[in-house]
Each structure stands twice: as C-alpha cells, then as structure tokens.
Amino acid sequence: MSVRPLRYLGDPVLRTPTDPVTRFDDSLASLIEDLIDTVQEPGRAGLAANQIGTGLAVFSYNVDGQLGYLINPRIVELSGDVEDLEGCLSIPGVTATRHRAATAVAAGVDVRQDPVIVAGTGELARCLQHEIDHLHGELYIDKLDGDERRRVIRQISADRLLDHQMSAD
C-alpha cells in the first residue's frame, strides 16, 4: 500500500488511548499493509497505529528479521529486568535509558481474527512493550525517572526552541 507520515510529540493522537478493533474488513487490511510498509523503512523496529494518526489498537514490528503485526494486543507475560537505551519515531533524535522487562509475551489476533502470540527477548521484548504502551496513549518518556527524565525534557525543550528559531528565520 503505502508508507504513511508519522505523528510527533505534541500531536494529541499520541496521548489518546486507541479503540479495540471490532470491524475486520478491507479498511483494517489496508491499515495493516500501511503499518507493515511504514515499519520497514530503515531504522524502524515498531509502529503503533496512532503514530500514523489512526486510533485503533494495532501495531507492526520489524525486529531481527521478524516482521508482523498484532491487533488488539495485550501483554500476557513479563519477566526479568533490563535497562537499555530506548527511542521513539514520534520523538526523533531523543534516546533515554529505560527499564523494561527482559522477556515479553504479547497476545492478540490477526486480520482473520485468529489468535497470535509473539514472544521476545532483547529488542523484540522492548518493542512489544513500547508499542502496546503507545496504544494506551503512553510514551516511553513518561516512565523515566530522576536525572534521565530531566535530561530528556531539557533536550526536547531545546530541540523545540531551535526548531522555532529556525522557522522564524
């Protein structure tokens, strides 16, 4: 189908919890194709539907050669703990150290409404958690603590000020 434009921090759609998918039709199939096409752009691991302006509970992933999607996903198991750098397509240029579960299992359905389970460690585990957070209207920066949170807020503020100054020139 097509690569869709991304929505960025400040767009209210990113802070709005998505609605469960109830209509499994051609429109949903088209959305999934767009999510798959869009997540295959270089440097992308996951993409939630609200990141392309659609308020439905669907995301795509492209991690370590695994390409797929989940409809109406939920985390069914988390274990372990890992701290690593995390970023987000909707907050370009900003990364932060974030705690996540080391292993994650997500359940949902596919476009035929068949059950799907995706289990992962490492980057896939982080991606599953990150994208499902997006579908709840949450961004990874929301759960940062202390100095890391302050650093990220300063960076975002400085980036916005620079963007504003450049657009005024």
Image: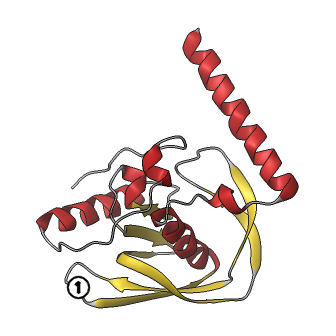
Left/right of residue 134 with respect to residue 165 in the rendered view: left
Give the residue displayed 34% in from the left and 58% down from the top: 55
| Quadrant housing the C terminus | top right
Front in this rendered view, residue 2 or 128: 128
Please state the total of marks drawn on the protein image: 1
Left/right of residue 139 with respect to residue 54 in the rendered view: right
Give the residue displayed 27% in from the left and 66% down from the top: 32
| Quadrant housing the N terminus | bottom left
Residue 8 in sight in this render = yes
Residue 40 in sight in this render = no
From what the image shows, is residue 26 above or below residue 120? Answer: above
Farthest residue to the right: give it. 147
Farthest residue to the left: give it. 26
From what the image shows, is residue 89 above or below residue 153? Answer: below
Front in this rendered view, residue 57 or 130: 57
For mark 1, what is the residue? 113
Asked which quadrant contains residue 126, the reply is bottom right
Q: Residues within 10 Å of mark 1 (few under 14, many from 20)?
A: few
Disc 1 is placed on an element classified as: loop
Give the residue displayed 56% in from the left and 77% down from the top: 124
Which amino acid does the dot numbered 1 rest on? Gln
Front in this rendered view, residue 141 or 122: 141
Pinpoint residue 30: horizontal percent, then vertical percent: 19, 62
Give the residue displayed 68% in from the left and 83% down from the top: 102
Pinpoint residue 157: horizontal percent, then vertical percent: 71, 34
Farthest residue to the top: give it. 169
Front in this rendered view, residue 96 or 13: 13
Asked which quadrant contains residue 122, the reply is bottom right
Left/right of residue 25 with respect to residue 13 in the rendered view: left
